Image (cartoon, rainbow, N blue to C red):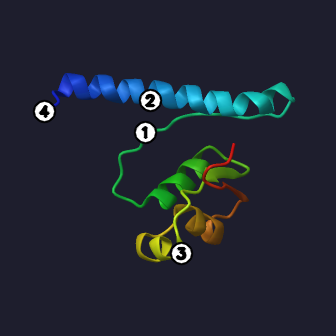
Amino acid sequence: MVITPVQREALVKKALEASERSIIDLAQPLCDKGIAAEACVIVEKSYEDTAHCLATVADDYNAECMVIGSTGKSWLERLFLGSVSHYLIQHYTHPVIVVPAGSS
């Protein structure tokens, strides 16, 4: 199956809208309790690694902390594939909250 550029653009737009809804739904309970939260979806085309891009964006937004999910990789998978959350815990200058895979 070949996807045309127009179809690709429509798929990307739909995915971004779904991501924004999910992020807002996750932040809403915090806002309901009077906790200030900013939720956004950022699309960054970069050849840098994911962890470095996330840290840079968080710094650009003057984030006080970062909340990131873990994928639930085994120690062997983390050894060979790396771990974004582990890298951020070790190198990011602000608190990092890691939500385990499968958490509600």
Please state which amino acid type lies under the numbered disc 1. Val
Question: Which comes sooner in the sequence, label 1 or label 2?
Answer: 2
Q: Residue at x 56, y 68 (%)?
A: 87
Category of crowding for the residue at label 2, using alpha-carbon neighbours closer than 10 angstroms: few (below 14), some (14–19), many (at least 20)? some
Please state which of the two labelled residues, at mark 2 or mark 3, is closer to the viewer.
3
Question: Which comes sooner in the sequence, label 3 or label 1?
Answer: 1
Q: Which element is circle 1 on?
A: loop
Please state which amino acid type lies under the numbered disc 2. Leu
Category of crowding for the residue at label 3, using alpha-carbon neighbours closer than 10 angstroms: few (below 14), some (14–19), many (at least 20)? few
Question: Which comes sooner in the sequence, label 1 or label 4?
Answer: 4
Label 3 – label 1 distance at C-alpha: 29 Å
Label 1 – label 2 distance at C-alpha: 9 Å
Label 1 – label 4 distance at C-alpha: 23 Å
Instruction: List the residue tagged with mark 2.
Output: 16
Instruction: List the residue tagged with mark 3.
Output: 75
Label 2 – label 3 distance at C-alpha: 31 Å
Q: Which element is circle 2 on?
A: helix
Q: Nearer the viewer, residue 32 or 38?
A: 32
Q: Residue at x 13, y 33 (%)?
A: 1
Q: Is residue 33 left or right of residue 102?
A: right
Q: Are marks 1 and 2 in contact (CB under 8 Å)?
A: yes
Which circle marks residue 43 in the picture? 1
